[in-house]
Every structure is written in structure tokens, then in C-alpha cells.
Image (tube, rainbow, N blue to C red):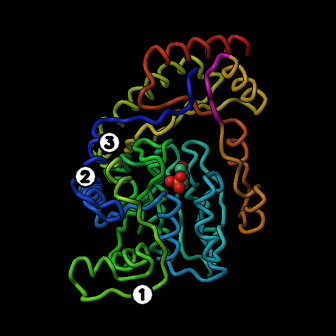
């Protein structure tokens, strides 16, 4: 059986966990390995401030708190995304406002953002789908003109670049995921990247239950106390120890995935009349988070997924557009047609892509796809 995703060990995960327990003696958050992860992320991304969180969901929740949203404030985002992109803002009483996506990259259509802006709009939350960058020049330009903040949901985009800039470092804040289905993993895990000075100090406080404990640990205050709202967003140092080994090998992991991605892309070329392959804009470097193809309709996609399953190959689809979900209808609103979002949701399929996927697996997958394509 070929699974859709398979968690993996890359090098020193166990060694670092053992060191954290036996030598460092710190299992809570913000121990040695958390600090090592922060430093490595800051160095690799050339970022001002990186803070580990339990998940990208937690990072998005921190971003929403940092924005100081009031009930009824609006945040513009795509509907074609994971629930956490919207949920984080709904928890603050804000209203996610959906606009349609681009048919090429499947990212938010930057040309539809301006018409969705109202006096209540506070931010744009863009999602770099499949690790392929949104049109950030245009988005940051709109944000500047209307005095909006930009949050990058970069859950899928660690190691991707837009015009030479690492994704997650272009907006005011960027949120990453280390969930086992992403490129670099720690089971569950995430990080928030703070790119604007105004949010740095408060981010530490919100992450530490609303206290100034981080300052206390650095000796900047002589006692720590409750100073703001917050929660516990910091992961145990055991998670950080696992993650540090993965982060050290981030380029190796991404290069391996790019190799697999390119093999898929080369294979599917001959079916260009029947299937649409991913499109990567010029000036962008992606991290091969996902290989997907688009079929002509829902029926063909369903047949494909069933056919592959019969041959023990798992392929999956996502997302049910948020604007048509029960909670989306209750808490969010959509501006304009969601035609592209609806179509993509019906026709996209993701193929197995993980670090340990080998040529033998790939050739078996290709053989079965060839068999399926003969039936079309
Ligand atoms: C995976 C993902 C998330 C959630 O990440 P968690 O770490 O599981 O909370 C959020 N947004 C997008 C676009 C994702 O792909």
C-alpha cells in the first residue's frame, strides 16, 4: 500500500530528545532546543523574530490577538483554505471575508481584494497554497494604501521564496506548521514569525499566558506578572528537540521533495490535454509541499481516487470551501463569485508525496495512472 503521507525521522531526533531529558533537564517550553529552533529559523529565514507554537493554528491565533481586533472587524482571505485560517479570527469576534482565488496558482486573487475592503477591514490573511507564493507585491501595496496588516498563512510554505524573499517574512507576521503532513515535521507544531517591530514584545507576552516571563528569564525585570491577555502557546522542549533535527535538514528535505515533484510533473506532461498540472509563477521558488492535478470534473476525479484506492494508492482531495461550510455560513461572508474556488474544490486531487517515497513507489503510481488514463 502506498500511503498519501508518511511521517519520517531525518537524523538526530532521538539523540536530541535524549539530550533534552538527560543533560539539559528541561522538558517545559523555551529550553535549549526551543532556543536553537528560534535561532535557526531566524537565520534560515533572515527573520527578526521566530517563536515556536503548538501548531500553525496557535500561531494564527496569536496573530489574531496581536492585531487587536474588535468584534465585527473584517479580515480578507481565500475560502479555499484550511479552517484555521478563518477560525483564528472568528475566535476574536472578527469576520473572515472571502474573495475568490486565481485559477493558475489557486492563491487569493489579489485583483479582488480592493473591492472587498470596507471601513471595518483590518487585515489581509493570504495563504501560500501548496507552498507557491501569493502575489505579495500587489498585496502589500494594497495593505499600505488602506493601512491594513498582512498575515501570511505560510503553513505549507517553509523554504519557498517570492522574488528572493522567504515566505512568512514578507507580511507583518507569518505562520508556519510542522504538522506531520508538512515538509518539516514534529507531529504537531508551528511557529509565528514577527516581521514588524510593533508586535515583537507583545508576541512574547501573549505566548507566555499574558505574562512578562520571557523578560524575567532574560533578567530584564526582577519579577514577572500578568500584564496582558494571552494563553499557553509554547511547545515542550521535547517537541523542539525533535523539530531541531528536522530544521537542520530542511534543505535536504525540500530538495528530496522537489525531486519527487519534478518527476510527477514530467510524468503528467503527456496528459496536458486531459489534466491540468500546477503552475509556478516566474520569480518564485517553491518547496514542493504538494503535487496536485486538476481533472475536468468531479465525476472524473471521484473515479480516479476510487481507481487508485483499488490499487492500494491513497490520493486525497480538499478543501470543502469555507464559504459553503456550516460554520463558514454562520461566521463569515463571501464577496463576489466563488466560481474558481468551487470548481477547484471539485476537481483537485493530491498525489502521495513524502520524504521516503522512492522510485519504485513512483513507478508503480505512474503505471496505475497510465492504466486509469486509458479509460478516459
Ligand atoms: C496545515 C495548515 C494549517 C494548520 O496547521 P496546524 O499546524 O495543523 O495547526 C493552517 N493553514 C493551512 C493553509 C494549512 O495547510
Q: What residue sits right under mark 1 in the picture?
A: 226
Q: Measuring from the top left, give residue 353's x and y in whole percent.
A: 49, 30
Q: Residue at x 36, y 64 (%)?
A: 29
- Ranked by sequence position, the earlier of labels 3 and 2 is 3
Q: Measuring from the top left, give residue 160's x and y in whole percent.
A: 38, 46
Frontmost of labels 3 and 2 is 2
Identify the element where label 1 is drawn. Answer: loop
Indicate whether residue 53 is drawn in magenta.
no
Residue 229 to residue 95: above or below: below
Q: What residue sits right under mark 2 in the picture?
A: 22
Label 2: how many Cα within 10 Å (few below 14, some 14–19, many 20+):
few
| Quadrant (top left, top right, bottom left, bottom right) of the C terminus | top right
Q: Nearer the viewer, residue 290 or 227?
A: 227
* Circles 3 and 2 in contact, beta carbons < 8 Å: no
- Ranked by sequence position, the earlier of labels 1 and 3 is 3
Residue 194 to residue 157: above or below: below
Indicate whether residue 313 is drawn in magenta.
yes
- Ranked by sequence position, the earlier of labels 1 and 2 is 2
How many numbered discs, if any? 3
Q: Residue at x 74, y 56 (%)?
A: 337
Q: Measuring from the top left, give residue 222's x and y in whole percent.
A: 24, 89
Q: Quadrant of residue 301?
A: top right
Q: Residue at x 73, y 58 (%)?
A: 323
Q: Quadrant of residue 248?
A: top left
In this orientation, does residue 250 appear?
no
Point out which mark residue 13 bears: 3
Q: Residue at x 73, y 46 (%)?
A: 342
Residues drawn in magenta: 311-316
Main secondary-structure element of the magenta-colored stretch: loop
Mark 1 to mark 3: distance in Å? Answer: 35 Å
Amino acid at each position: 500500500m502506498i500511503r498519501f503521507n508518511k511521517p519520517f525521522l531525518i537524523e538526530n531526533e532521538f539523540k536530541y530528545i535524549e539530550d533534552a531529558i538527560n543533560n539539559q533537564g528541561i522538558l517545559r517550553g523555551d529550553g535549549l532546543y526551543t532556543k536553537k529552533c528560534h535561532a535557526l529559523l531566524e537565520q534560515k529565514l533572515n527573520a527578526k523574530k521566530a517563536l515556536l507554537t503548538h501548531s500553525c493554528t496557535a500561531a494564527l491565533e496569536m496573530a489574531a490577538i496581536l492585531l487587536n481586533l474588535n468584534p465585527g472587524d473584517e479580515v480578507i482571505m481565500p475560502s479555499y483554505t484550511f479552517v484555521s485560517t478563518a477560525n483564528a479570527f472568528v475566535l476574536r469576534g472578527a469576520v473572515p471575508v472571502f474573495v475568490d482565488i486565481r485559477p493558475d496558482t489557486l492563491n487569493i486573487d489579489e485583483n479582488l481584494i480592493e473591492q472587498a475592503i470596507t471601513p471595518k477591514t483590518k487585515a489581509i490573511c493570504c495563504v501560500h497554497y501548496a507552498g507557491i507564493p501569493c502575489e505579495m507585491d500587489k498585496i502589500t501595496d494594497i495593505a499600505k494604501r488602506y493601512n491594513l496588516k498582512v498575515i501570511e498563512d505560510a503553513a505549507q510554505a517553509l523554504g519557498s521564496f517570492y522574488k528572493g524573499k522567504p515566505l512568512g517574512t514578507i507580511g507583518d507576521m507569518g505562520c508556519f506548521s510542522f504538522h506531520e503532513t508538512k515538509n518539516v515535521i514534529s507531529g504537531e507544531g508551528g511557529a509565528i514569525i514577527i516581521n514588524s517591530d510593533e508586535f515583537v514584545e507583545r508576541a512574547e507576552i501573549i505566548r507566555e499566558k499574558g505574562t512578562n516571563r520571557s523578560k524575567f528569564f532574560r533578567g530584564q525585570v526582577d519579577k514577572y506578572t500578568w500584564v496582558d491577555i494571552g494563553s499557553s502557546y509554547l511547545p515542550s522542549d521535547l517537541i523542539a528537540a525533535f523539530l531541531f533535527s528536522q530544521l537542520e535538514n530542511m534543505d535536504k528535505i525540500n530538495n528530496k521533495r522537489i525531486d519527487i515533484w519534478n518527476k510527477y510533473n514530467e510524468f503528467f506532461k503527456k496528459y496536458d490535454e486531459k489534466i491540468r498540472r500546477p503552475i509556478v509563477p516566474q520569480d518564485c521558488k517553491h518547496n514542493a509541499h504538494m503535487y496536485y492535478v486538476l481533472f475536468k470534473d468531479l465525476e472524473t476525479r471521484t473515479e480516479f481516487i476510487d481507481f487508485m484506492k483499488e490499487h492500494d494508492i491513497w490520493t486525497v482531495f480538499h478543501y470543502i470551501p469555507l464559504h459553503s461550510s456550516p460554520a463558514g455560513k454562520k461566521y463569515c461572508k463571501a464577496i463576489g463569485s466563488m466560481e474558481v474556488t468551487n470548481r477547484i474544490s471539485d476537481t483537485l486531487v493530491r498525489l502521495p508525496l513524502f520524504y521516503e517515497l522512492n522510485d519504485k513507489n513512483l513507478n508503480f503510481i505512474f503505471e496505475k495512472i497510465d492504466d486509469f488514463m486509458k479509460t478516459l
